[in-house]
Image (cartoon, helix red, strand yellow):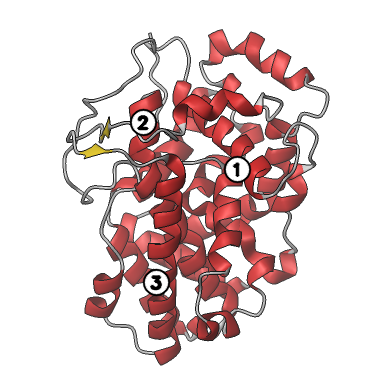
Amino acid sequence: MPGPKTHDIFYKNLKRKLNSKTLDSFPNYDKYNIFVQGHDFLIYHDFYKKANSKALDEGVDMSVQLQEHKFQEYVYNYLKTAEKTGSIEQEDVRLFIGPGYVMHHLLDAYTHPQIIYYAGDHTKNPEFKTWYHGILENLLDIYMMETFEGIDAKTYKVYKDFEIDKSLISNDLISTIDTSLANTYGFQDGGKMFEEAFQQLSLFMRVMKYDKTGIKRVFFDILDPLTKGSRAFSYHRDFNEVIPYLNLEHEEWLNPTDGRVSNASFLDLYEKALDDGAYIVDELEKICQSGSIHRDDVYSIIPNISSVHGLECEKPFQLKYTKKTNNK
């Protein structure tokens, strides 16, 4: 998963690529930017209560289920649930699934293989001395903030970008999320978890990412040998640290699961996700506006790919190819 700010910028950049009919149906598009955090909400949920690794792992495990399994089926179940209840007419219900959830998944699927190739697995491995994957994603956030928004990630009050008015979240949205998660994955109270995470995300960004003085960076770096992940947080890092991982020179790299060769840079992958994503959102909104949800229509638009490696969901995989050799 690219970091929260990279997804946030993606959502904002996506708007300029959507057609006019889609934008007309989303007059409040800008107010719902947090929706693009997608399945990562399950990781951020109750983060301040997760002092023990078991509680943290439960949230991660749920998120991984959404990352790797039944992507098409979930999108269809969500839309079909919304159709049956009539909530598909509500803007927040449609914004959550298209520009939000689906676009989070797509950006992950396009960029994640390259991130894994350069920095290792997306999940923490206790045998590694540190979690380079998380560190790289944090650096990408900083790069994207300064490149696309022209802001200093070290001092910018980033948590303000993740605030949302409670009144913008309808009960129908929470009910739709809850029912579709239960029908697809068997999760209970999933809607409540998302609802709580919507409000907790800004606090996560303030506590874990915003670091004007750099004191959190010092603390996280000291703590990292114990947690093997703390260095993945503070935005008080140097902009240039990420440059070696952007592949701006277009060197060849390998998909870590099957060895497919690419010379795309991170920005190439990001732009492709924007172009393909705009088409998907436009087409999905056409279906929603028709008021009639059919499985074949949804499946023809939504690629059934894992957000971890960009390959087919349910396909067994093993991460084989990585450039970094000093993970241990």
Nearest to the observer: residue 97 or residue 104: 104
20 vs 323, left or right, is right
131 vs 91, left or right, is left
Q: Amino acid at mark 3?
A: Tyr
CA gap, disc 2 and disc 1:
18 Å
> Do callouts 2 and 1 mark residues in contact (Cβ within 8 Å)?
no
User: Eyeballing the image, is 119 above or below 147?
Assistant: above
300 vs 138, left or right, is left
> Label 1's element?
helix
> Do callouts 3 and 1 mark residues in contact (Cβ within 8 Å)?
no
Q: Amino acid at mark 1?
A: Met
Taking the view exactly as shown, the residue that stands out farthest to the right is 213
The residue under label 2 is 116
Q: Residues within 10 Å of mark 1 (few under 14, many from 20)?
A: many
263 vs 25, left or right, is left
CA gap, disc 3 and disc 1:
23 Å
- Checking the image for residue 279, the label placed there is 3
> Label 3's element?
helix
Residue 286 appears in the picture as rendered: yes
